[in-house]
Image: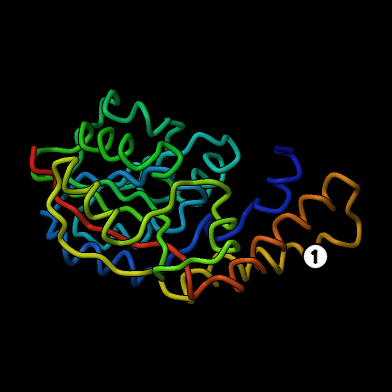
Amino acid sequence: MDWDSFFAVHSDLPREGPGEAEDVAWALALAGLPEGAAICDAGAGAGGDVAALLAVPGARVMAIDTHPGFVAQMRARFAGEGRVRVEAVDMATLAEHPEAPFDMIWCAGALYFLGLEEGLARMAAALKPGGVLAFSEPSFLTDAPSDDAWAFWEGYPVRDAAGIASAVAAAGYESLGTRVLGDAAWEAYYAPMEARIAALRGGADAALAAMLDLCAGEAAQWRRVKRETGYLLTVARWQG
C-alpha cells in the first residue's frame, strides 16, 4: 500500500467507510445505554460517527484508530469536545486499555480486519457484562452472489445474515437487531471521495494516479454489485 497516495485521497474526508447518523441512532435505541455511558468507537477512521454517538446523555466516547493521519485528524476535529478522547490503539488490544471495559463498542466496517470470530471475542473481552457491540460486517444479500460480488471483498469470507447471526450467538452474544446499510450510507462515503479524486486528477504523479484509479474503481464496483452485497449492521448484547 502506498500510504502517502492513500492519505492524499482520504485526508480530511468526513468518514472512512459507509454509514450515516441514522444508523447510529437506530443502534443506540436498541442498546438502551445508561446516562454517562462509556463508549468506544473502534476503528474510527476519520471519526465520522463520533458526533452521533454523543447523543447518549453524558456519554464519554473514546475513538481509536491505528493510522496516525486519522488519529491526528480526529484530534483536530474534536479538540473542543471534552467528552471525546482520541487514541492510537489497536482493536486487538482494546481489552488491555485502562478505559476498558465499555458499556458499548461501535465498530463500523472495521471488525473484519480481525476476522469475525476473533473480532467478536476480542470485543467481548473489552465489554462490561451486558455491554453492547454494534458492528457492520460484509454480507451477501442474495443466495447466489455473482463473481463480481465475491471479488468486491477481495477474498474475505463473506457470509449471509444467517451466518453472521450464528457466529454472534456462538460467541456468547444476544442479537438485539440487524439492518442492512442503505445506499445513502455508502454514498456518504463514496461521494466525497469521488469529489476528492476529481480534484486531484490534474496534478497526480504515477503513484497517486494509480491510487485514484483504485479508489474510483472500488466505488464503481460497489454500484455494480450493491443489490447483491453490502454491510449488515448488527447490535448484540454480551452475555458474559
- Residue drawn at x 30%, y 38% is 117
Front one among 140 and 79: 140
- Residue drawn at x 37%, y 29% is 92
- Residue drawn at x 41%, y 36% is 114
Q: Residues within 10 Å of mark 1 (few under 14, many from 20)?
A: few
Front one among 56 and 43: 43
Residue sticking out furthest to the front: 144
Give the residue number, with chain letter if any, for mark 1.
199
Q: Is 44 drawn above or below residue 215 in the view shown?
A: above
Residue 125 at x, y = what percent?
A: 21, 31
Residue 10 at x, y = what percent?
A: 65, 52
- Residue drawn at x 63%, y 67% is 192
Residue 197 at x, y = what percent?
A: 75, 62
Q: Quadrant of the N terminus?
A: top right
What coloring was used for the rendering? rainbow
Front one among 107 and 233: 233
Q: Is 66 drawn above or below residue 197 in the view shown?
A: above
Residue 132 at x, y = what percent?
A: 18, 49
Mark 1, secondary structure of its residue:
helix
Q: Is 14 drawn above or below residue 47 in the view shown?
A: below
Kindly identify the amino acid type of the residue bearing the numbered disc 1: Ala
Q: Quadrant of residue 137?
A: bottom left
Left or right: 92 as drawn, with respect to 222: left
Q: Quadrant of the C terminus?
A: top left
Left or right: 1 as drawn, with respect to 128: right
Left or right: 160 as drawn, with respect to 30: right
